[in-house]
Image (cartoon, rainbow, N blue to C red):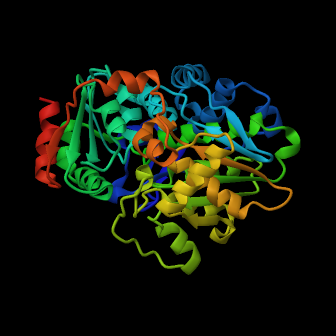
């Protein structure tokens, strides 16, 4: 299987090259040159999670890695479930927070770590550089922790992620370096892009990215959409509508890729917070990012989503109109109101899942089954959820453990030269 650069189609690479590089020339995203045929999807849905996921990922990777190797990678990565929870008649939550860092990014982060270990040169330098608006950092840090041949540098906006999110990945040390940047997530993302544009730096430190721009993370996320549908009663698979809380849009990209492989999904809904670049674009046809707005759903505080070009490419290839996507933007006040409604109905959620649930409820039609993604455990946003719901949520073991540990983060300005110094220092 070859992948091509969306900005320079003549640049075509193998899966291994795409995983090692992260981005192509001119900061281009890699995209599969062909979408595999999975055959009988109904039979696929009867398989267990790991076996099914191995078959899906092997179809993308091709002959570069054996099916046995891919199965072992998936088994190592997906050691936790992605269960459905019935919230009310005809509406289900896909709970993606049962992994070690209590967020959906455990799936992609851990599969990327397995992939990079499988395709990296044994003696080469590897420095993972990624930006996080909250959950990516923890998932990547824990996935790569202890791999001493791989150094990890994680940028995050200082004071703009929840304290427990910060503690979960900024207390590890060893091969994990975390940097609190004076700025927004988009500033952090711009620093990552600038680093990849510096060819000498890339070569000197073996730069790679673990953001959802890395194709291995995105491919892993396809798998839990199949797992969600597999858990639905067959009668409810026919008119399925999935609402996706969206920030950098990797999750929606993966869902649309799952649909392109034959997964029966009637339509997807884009659910954002006040950072509503995509909903406004779908409504007006004008791409007009604004300054990032801080919200209580901070993992979605992204005004220039990196993965959107992949969505446009896929829709063009499949002949799907962007107008087939539902969309909606939700304010903090509406998010809080929805959290209270969900809790009153017996389901404890957090802001990102609540946004997806609200837009789904607004747009779900008679005869349709609704599914929304719960991307993080409510305790990861304990301060916000406790205040809104007047609760005192118990901390799961991983949060309780790291919450008591000392922060190890460096603090740096939004300055590329300062970041370059950090990147060179971790490989010294």
In the picture, the quarter occupied by the N terminus is top right
Left or right of residue 207: residue 309: right
Residue 155, position as x, y percentages in the image: 26, 44
Task: Determine the image quadrant of residue 143.
Answer: top left
State whether residue 225 is above or below residue 259.
above
State whether residue 302 is above or below residue 385.
below
Residue 128, position as x, y percentages in the image: 30, 37
State the residue lying farthest toward the right.
Answer: 235
Residue at position x 27%, y 20% from top?
Answer: 148
Residue at position x 59%, y 54% from top?
Answer: 338
Number of residue marks: 0
Residue 279, position as x, y percentages in the image: 54, 69
Q: Nearer the viewer, residue 134 or 294?
A: 294
Left or right of residue 46: residue 125: left
Residue 254, position as x, y percentages in the image: 58, 48
State the residue lying farthest toward the front.
Answer: 390
Residue at position x 46%, y 65% from top?
Answer: 274
Q: Looking at the image, can residue 34 be seen?
A: no
Left or right of residue 285: residue 128: left
Task: Determine the image quadrant of residue 220.
Answer: top right
Residue at position x 67%, y 69% from top?
Answer: 321
Left or right of residue 409: residue 39: right
Task: Determine the image quadrant of residue 52.
Answer: top right
In the picture, the quarter occupied by the C terminus is top left
Q: Looking at the image, can residue 83 be seen?
A: yes
């Amino acid at each position: 299987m070859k992948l091509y650069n969306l900005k320079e189609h003549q640049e075509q690479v193998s899966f291994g090259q795409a995983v090692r590089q992260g981005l192509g020339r001119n900061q281009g995203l890699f995209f599969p040159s062909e979408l595999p045929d999975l055959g009988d999807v109904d039979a696929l849905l009867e398989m267990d999670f790991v076996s099914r996921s191995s078959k899906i990922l092997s179809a993308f990777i091709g002959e570069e890695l054996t099916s046995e190797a891919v199965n072992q990678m998936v088994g190592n990565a997906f050691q936790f479930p992605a269960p459905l929870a019935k919230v009310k008649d005809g509406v289900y939550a896909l709970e993606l927070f049962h992994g070690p860092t209590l967020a959906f990014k455990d799936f992609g982060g851990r599969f990327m770590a397995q992939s990079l270990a499988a395709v990296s040169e044994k003696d080469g330098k590897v420095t993972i550089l990624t930006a996080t608006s909250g959950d990516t950092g923890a998932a990547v840090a824990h996935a790569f922790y202890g791999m001493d041949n791989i150094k990890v540098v994680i940028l995050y906006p200082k004071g703009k992620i929840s304290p427990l999110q910060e503690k979960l990945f900024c207390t590890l040390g060893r091969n994990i370096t975390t940097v609190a940047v004076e700025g927004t997530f988009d500033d952090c993302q711009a620093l990552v892009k600038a680093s990849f544009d510096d060819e000498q730096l890339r070569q000197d430190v073996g730069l790679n990215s673990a953001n959802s721009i890395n194709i291995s993370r995105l491919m892993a996320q396809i798998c839990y959409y199949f797992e969600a549908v597999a858990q639905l009663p067959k009668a409810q698979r026919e008119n399925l509508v999935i609402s996706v809380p969206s920030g950098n849009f990797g999750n929606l990209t993966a869902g649309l890729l799952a649909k392109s492989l034959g997964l029966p999904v009637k339509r997807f809904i884009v659910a954002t917070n006040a950072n509503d670049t995509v909903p406004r674009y779908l409504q007006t046809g004008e791409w007009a990012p604004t300054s990032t707005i801080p919200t209580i759903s901070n993992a979605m505080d992204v005004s220039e989503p990196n993965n959107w070009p992949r969505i446009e490419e896929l829709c063009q290839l499949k002949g799907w109109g962007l107008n087939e996507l539902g969309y909606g933007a939700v304010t903090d006040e509406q998010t809080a109101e929805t959290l209270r409604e969900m809790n009153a109905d017996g389901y404890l959620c957090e802001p990102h899942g609540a946004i997806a649930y609200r837009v789904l409820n607004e747009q779900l039609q008679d005869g349709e089954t609704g599914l929304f993604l719960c991307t993080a455990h409510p305790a990861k946003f304990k301060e916000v959820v406790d205040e809104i719901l007047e609760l005192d949520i118990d901390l799961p073991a991983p949060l309780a453990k790291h919450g008591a540990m000392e922060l190890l983060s460096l603090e740096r300005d939004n300055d590329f030269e300062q970041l370059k110094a950090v990147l060179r220092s971790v490989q010294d």
